[in-house]
Image (spheres, rainbow, N blue to C red):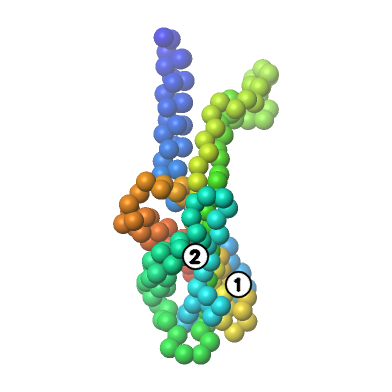
Amino acid sequence: MTHRWKQALVVVAALALAVAVVHAGVKVRAEFDKEYDFSKARTFGWHPDGAGEVKLLMREGGDPEQIRARWEPTIKDAVEQEMTKRGLSPAASGVPDLYLNYYFLSGPNSEAQTRGQFIGAIPPWGVPDFEMTTTSLKIFEQGTLILDIIDGPKRQIVWRGIAEAQVDRQRTPAEREKRIREAVGEVLKKYPPKAKK
């Protein structure tokens, strides 16, 4: 095997490892109202119409109400702990500064790897580009936790955090609970948004 081929194999192995590390974790992102003053919020409470909702995007996979009943206490506890760490308190009565609401979505997702995907659209050496053919396809169940933070008096969403991860049904309930708490912690690292300087 030539030195060039050995180098190519090392690069391919490194890319495969990088992809595996990304899938092992939780992908998070957040969006927020840039006009809202988050520093004025002092209290929070769960939305009066219900703390959250579970939506299954598959025919099989369980009853959404059973899943909600099983995992809602964990989600609520994890969110409340994170909000308290950020200096907010549960509202004793009345309308809180912020309402909290979550959605848990579970459904199929896929990833494809194509030959030539890591080469730019225009080949730099003037040689023809690779024919874009799929070399691997992975279909998996993805869980998405969406947390909305809503201005209490105005009832408008001012912040939304999204955490996505692959669902592994082989995990024990304790491992799943830990995963949910980690996802909530990761997504709420983005709250409150950092003030622009």
Marks 1 and 2, how far apart at CA: 25 Å
Residue assigned mark 1: 157
Would you say 107 lies left or right of 169 here?
right
Q: How many marks?
A: 2
Residue 119's x, y, as percent?
Answer: 60, 28
Label 1 residue SS: strand
Task: Using the image as rendered, state which of residue 93 and residue 196 is in the foreground.
Answer: 93
Where, by quadrant of the figure, is residue 116 drawn?
top right
- Front in this rendered view, residue 28 or 180: 180
Q: Residue at x 41, y 64 (%)?
A: 70
Image vertical order of residue 173 relative to residue 9, above or below: below
* Amino acid carrying mark 1 in the image: Ile
Checking the image for residue 65, the label placed there is 2
Please give the name of the residue rendered at 57% of the width and 75% of the height, measured from the top-left corner. 150
Residue 112: percent from left, percent from top: 57, 34
**10 Å crowding of disc 1: few (<14), some (14-19), many (20+):** some
Numbered mark located on residue 52 in the image: none
Mark 2 crowd level (few <14, some 14–19, many ≥20, 10 Å Cα): few
Q: Position of residue 145 (x, y in %)?
A: 50, 59
The reply to whether residue 2 is in sight is yes
Q: Residue at x 51, y 84 (%)?
A: 96
Q: Amino acid at mark 2?
A: Glu
The C terminus - image quarter: bottom right
